[in-house]
Image (cartoon, rainbow, N blue to C red):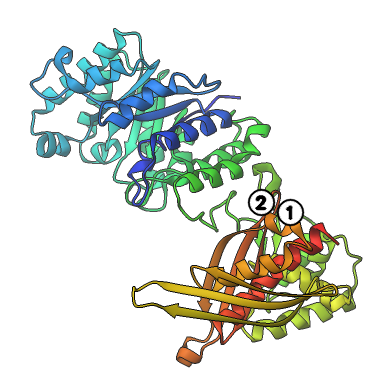
Amino acid sequence: MEKIKLYDTTLRDGMQAEGVSFSLDDKLSITKCIDELGLDYIEGGYAGSNPKETQFFAEVAKLGLKNSKIVAFGSTRRANTSVSDDVSLKAILECKTQAATLVGKSWDMHVSNVLGCSLDENISMCAESVEFLKKHSLELIFDAEHFYDGYKNNPEYAMKVLAAVAEAGADVLVLCDTNGGSLPDEVHEITSVVCEKFSPMVVGIHAHNDTDCATANTLAAVRAGARHVQGTMNGLGERCGNANFCTIIPNLVFKTGFEVLSPEKTRTLTEVSRFIFEIANLTPVMNMPYVGESAFAHKAGLHVDALRKSKYAYEHIAPELVGNERKFLISELSGKSNVLAELEKAKITQDKKLAKKILERVQELESEGFQFEAANASFDLLVKKVMGTFKPSFDLIKYYVTTEKRATGDLVTEATIKLKVADKVKHVVGEGDGPVNALDAALRKSLEDSYPIINEIHLIDYKVRVVNARAGTAARVRVIIESRDKSDVWGTVGCSENIIEASWQALVDSVEYKLQKDVK
């Protein structure tokens, strides 16, 4: 099988995404993660652009990477400047990497209107810069910026730029759809011309996602002969983002006949995606193909019924191939098959009468505003309650919450809880930054003597949604709480006209799920 080389630009292009900023430690952590995934190249950043980039190249050399080459990125020499005096080229050499990527103009409009130099001068700038770095024994990748737009506007000039850098010694010619406006048929046609003209040189593709076609354009370029693919993890990038390796990689692995990553590495892709989102402090994209939390989530009863008979009925690959998992969503739209599928996962005997009772209870609760799609733990407890096997770990006697605003402007919130745990009555007070935090603190105080394991629970997310907004301040609210311990993550739900009561319901379910799971 032919090999496709994968070139990651998350540390440069990804950082250009709105709201994303990586610290030095973040960049080093991402580098180790991508190296472990097995990509061929990791672009470290724009050489010499700021002190953090300079420090990165010094620190990354100490990591002992196993699979990836670190690449320094920079631009061709400036007009009317010699290569030996050019600041950008010097900065690339100072990074002391094995490979470098140079970006140069290939669209005549950009040369005339942006650079403000002659077309011939731009060709000299590109060729001389490549030749200069090749003399220093660097593997040289040339990014032909705006190539597809340039080719559509003036194909002769765009090809002259490529010919000049190829003659100067470039190892890879990367065709960039910098504005992200090209479509797959255009990319395939133009890439085919380039591959035929410059064979046997390696041709690459660098696609942006402004028409939502970056993945399709990348695959079109590969079909046309490109064997070097650039992208970012999770598609992070300026404007609408870059080509997304989390979709490109599995598409290449499972849908083409090329060598990309080993099955073992591909199975870590979901974990890598979520790690990058976490480092970037971004909420994961739920419906991202392959690695998204909803990528293999099924809600329609008809679909789930078919899946229980054949796992490929409504899935194009097995989720575990990319490290993801299948989910059956429970809602008022579900049928008995969804409930039976969940019972199968829980290793409970198939019982259609029980499934019907559970479904009726789900539909009744959802008509009141509950929702179980993101509340797997609440659904698990619901099943136990319908089956009659649920035994509460504690009983509420009463709770109340007070919020006091003082003359200083300080807000103090206290929650008082009275519970019966076994034969003991616990009456405690907890303080918090708000009513939910105070309730959580008081609940933990009440239970930690009897159930020390409660200290393993960490609340990691809290969401509130108004169910019937037209009711104004009397509207019901739905609270979803996400919790975790050392090994699991689970969701719980509460719903009430009173946000504190809805929060209490979700908190209690979270604690009960943990105790039912690990104590009883």
Helix, strand or loop at label 2? It is loop
Q: How many marks?
A: 2
Residue visible at 42% across and 49% down?
213
Say whether residue 421 is visible: yes
**Residue 49 image position (x, y, % from top left):** 25, 30
- Residue that label 2 marks: 316
For the question of whether residue 470 can be seen, the reply is no
User: Percent x, y for residue 125?
Assistant: 17, 21
- Measure the alpha-carbon separation of dots 1 and 2: 6 Å
Q: Are marks 1 and 2 in contact (CB under 8 Å)?
A: yes
Is residue 46 left or right of 388 when viewed as pictured?
left
Q: Which residue is mark 1?
A: 312
From this view, report whether residue 487 is shown above or below residue 403: above
Amino acid, disc 1: Tyr
Q: To which quarter of the image does residue 478 belong?
A: bottom right
Give SS at disc 1. Answer: loop
Closest to the observer: 502 or 238?
502
